[in-house]
Amino acid sequence: MADGANRGVELISIMVNAGERAVRDFNKLSGGEWFDESPEYFLTTYAASALKALGKTFALLEVSVDGTRQEAGAIRRGRPADDERRKGRFDIVTYWANGNPRGAIEIKSPMWSADKKRLHPDFSELCKALAADPTSTFQFGAFLFYASVSKPKRKHDNAIQCLRELIERVYDEAKLISQENGVGCVLFPFSAHRGKDEDEGAWCIACIVFTHKGGEKSFK
């Protein structure tokens, strides 16, 4: 870890907390609407802005994947694989105090299912950036997302439990992609929240962290 740098777990924690604040603020702003009605960038800006509270931490939005990987030294020799989205952009990139890329972050909101078509491209992009070179300046890749479930159709089902099962299905897909790329994968602790008043659904802000092999313990 760079001298005086914040621990990676602190960066993830502050973004998750910022995401929960975004949900509450949108609820007030909209007169009671669920965060499902919010544009994705609402969560993105809250997560990125929260990082300024940590000293020696910098962040940019919508940053070139290829440019970031080159700056981080995360370039694999030879021709890029066909499924590498090097021409895309990371939603957020955090930097070490010396200006080198530290973490790439993708945002998804809302998530109602473990849809492989929505999940795998982002998971693969983050994993391949880490796997390209274990000596790169990347410490982690993060998939930060808002997930919700509506009122269960069956009388005895529990919305909180349905939400936790959804998060586990998303995490299962993340583990699959991380294993294919030889990187670590951790589901950061999250809190499940019930809807208010007559609403009987549930929601959460969750984050899956990808790391170099052996780095998982730093995010638990």
Image: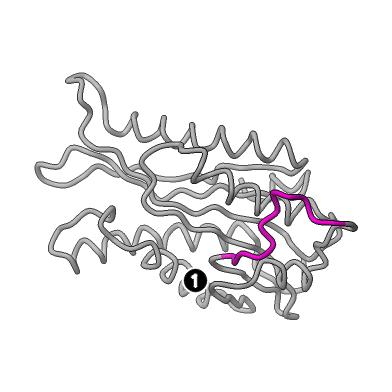
Q: Is mark 1 on a helix, strand or loop?
A: helix
Asked if residue 83 lies in the magenta stretch, the reply is yes
Q: In this view, does 65 lie above or below 188?
A: below
* Dot 1 amino acid type: Ala
x then y, percent, for residue 130: 75, 54
Quarter holding the C terminus is: top right
* Residue carrying label 1: 48
Q: Overall secondary structure of the magenta stretch?
A: loop
Q: Nearer the viewer, residue 40 or 196?
A: 40
- In the rendered view, does 98 fall on the left or right side of 208? right
What is the residue that sits farthest to the right in this orientation?
77
**Quadrant in the picture for residue 156:** top left
Say which residue appears at 34% left-offset and 29% top-offset. 161
Could you tell me which residue is drawn at 48 percent across and 32 percent down? 169
* Residue 94 picture quarter: bottom right
| Range covered by the magenta-colored residues | 79-90
Magenta-drawn stretch contains 209: no
Q: Residue at x 54, y 58 (%)?
A: 106
**In this image, 219 relative to 198: left or right?**
right
Left or right position of 125 against 71: left
Q: How many labels were placed on the picture?
A: 1
The front one of 44 and 22 is: 44
Percent of width and height locating residue 163:
36, 35
Task: Name the quarter where the N terminus is drawn.
Answer: bottom right
Give the quadrant of residue 24: bottom left
Left or right: where 155 falls relative to 125: left
Q: How crowded is mark 1: few (under 14 residues within 10 Å), some or many (20 or more)?
A: many
Residue 148 percent location from the top left of the image:
32, 43
Q: What percent of the width, then of the height, locates residue 174?
A: 59, 39
Which residue appears farthest toward the left when viewing the image?
198
Q: Please, which colouring scheme is shown?
A: one colour
Q: Is residue 21 above or below residue 188?
A: below
